[in-house]
Image (cartoon, rainbow, N blue to C red):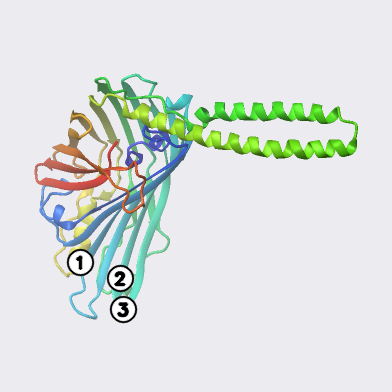
Amino acid sequence: MDAIAANAAAVAVRVPYSFSWFDYDVTVGISFPAAFRSTDFDNDGATGFTYENFLFYSFGGQVQAGPWGLGLLGDFQTYDLLPAQRTGDPQVTETLGRLHLVGGRSFLGGQLSLGGGIRAVMFSMDSQQNGVEKNQLSMENAGPELGVLVRPDYVPWRLGATFRAPVEGRGTAAIALASLPVPLVNPASILLPWELEMGAVIQLGPRPLNPTWLDPHEQEAEERRQIDDDRAARQAAQDAELGAIDDVGRKLERARELAAHETVIRREEDRRFVDARQRLLLERRAHYSNWARERITVLVELLVSGKASEAVGLESFFSAQSAMAKMMPLNDLRRSGQGISYSPRLGIEGEPVPDLLQIRFGTYIEPSRLGGQARQHFTFGFELKLIPWTVFGIVSKHHVWSIGGVADLAPRYQSFGLSLGAWH
């Protein structure tokens, strides 16, 4: 479901290890200030921040029912621009959030997926002093986004693209700067420019990239049809037998006998259907687990971001807020998004130790939205298979845990992370 941020159609793609008609997925992440404090976070040429306390966190969830999918993915940034040092000191926090709320459907047995929804942005400025909390400014708005993914059955490639319309959130009323405990910049709006994201994948090796998703309802339909046909045939035979009996008392007695017998038969048929569903589930699991694991997956992508007329950079804005809150000299606000930017990406993924270790390498160009020089990033990651564990019965006995690590390195920037999830 993390792919929702890259393609709105991802919500409708059924992965081969989804063995039930209804499925779900959740994600949560958090980044602490120490990870970015000494970096040039927004590629403006300067390292470090004028503020110390900030937190990045993300969350999301999705549900899928057959070919349909619905998902929500959000990431937020909270900045404590003026931490309270003593009781009674003013405190100012500002929060910026982005949300994707999308729905989608797959067609042609999953070979084509379409998705769409809204991309929302929100900004909040809050103050607190002497136990009194006050929202000083709120801005939010949303715009449409559309995505498509093409993945023909059992071919070693797939194509995808998504478009996001620009979103500009404005406050409902002008902020009264005099009411703030400290002076702050009054932003006119918060803007997400339009984006076009296009990507392609090719996979080498015996492992299939685009296997057909086995729909449990379709698999179980034949068994259910056979049971329904048998019941209809028995009902016709019973009706014919009862119709040939003229004696009313005898007909009622025979009808009771047939009903009791039918109850026993149907109980057995229901048990057989439950057994058949379990057998088909085991077959789907075996179908997936018996695939070869060896493969090399190559991904290429291009992200195009539109202009943001008269905008300033996010870090520049928050640095100015922090400086004003602390009565420090205000540096010049850095203009951002004065032109269209292009960010090409490349990723390679493989499994050097089958069914135990996956590794990933990548690189991408980060354009400077502030008019400086673009910089190249190099990314690395791994995922190591652990053991099955139900967490005291909370998750399925088939859940196999994995631990992973990531690194993103560039001039004046480095980021490291750990992840815990499911092995597939």
Residue type, label 1: Met
Look at discs 3 and 1 and give the one toward the viewer: 3
Residue 72: in sight, yes or no? no
Q: CA distance from mark 2 to mark 1?
A: 14 Å
Q: Residue at x 30, y 73 (%)?
A: 128
Q: Alpha-carbon neighbours of circle 2 within 10 Å: few (<14), some, or many (≥20)?
A: many
User: Which numbered circle lies on residue 324?
Assistant: 1
* Nearest to the observer: residue 85 or residue 256: 256
Q: Which residue is mark 3?
A: 131
Q: Give SS at disc 1.
A: helix
Look at discs 2 and 1 and give the one toward the viewer: 2
Q: Residue at x 65, y 38 (%)?
A: 264
Mark 3 and mark 1 in contact? Answer it, CB < 8 Å.
Answer: no
User: Which quarter of the rendering shows the C terminus?
Assistant: top left
Look at discs 2 and 3 and give the one toward the viewer: 3
Mark 2 and mark 3 in contact? Answer it, CB < 8 Å.
Answer: no
User: Which quarter of the rendering shows the N terminus?
Assistant: top left
Q: Position of residue 183 (x, y in %)?
A: 25, 69
Q: Position of residue 291 (x, y in %)?
A: 31, 25
Q: CA distance from mark 2 to mark 3?
A: 10 Å
Mark 2 and mark 1 in contact? Answer it, CB < 8 Å.
Answer: no
Which is nearer the N-term, disc 2 or disc 1?
2
The image quarter in which residue 343 lies: top left
Residue type, label 3: Gly
User: Which numbered circle lies on residue 127?
Assistant: 2
Q: Position of residue 247 (x, y in %)?
A: 90, 34
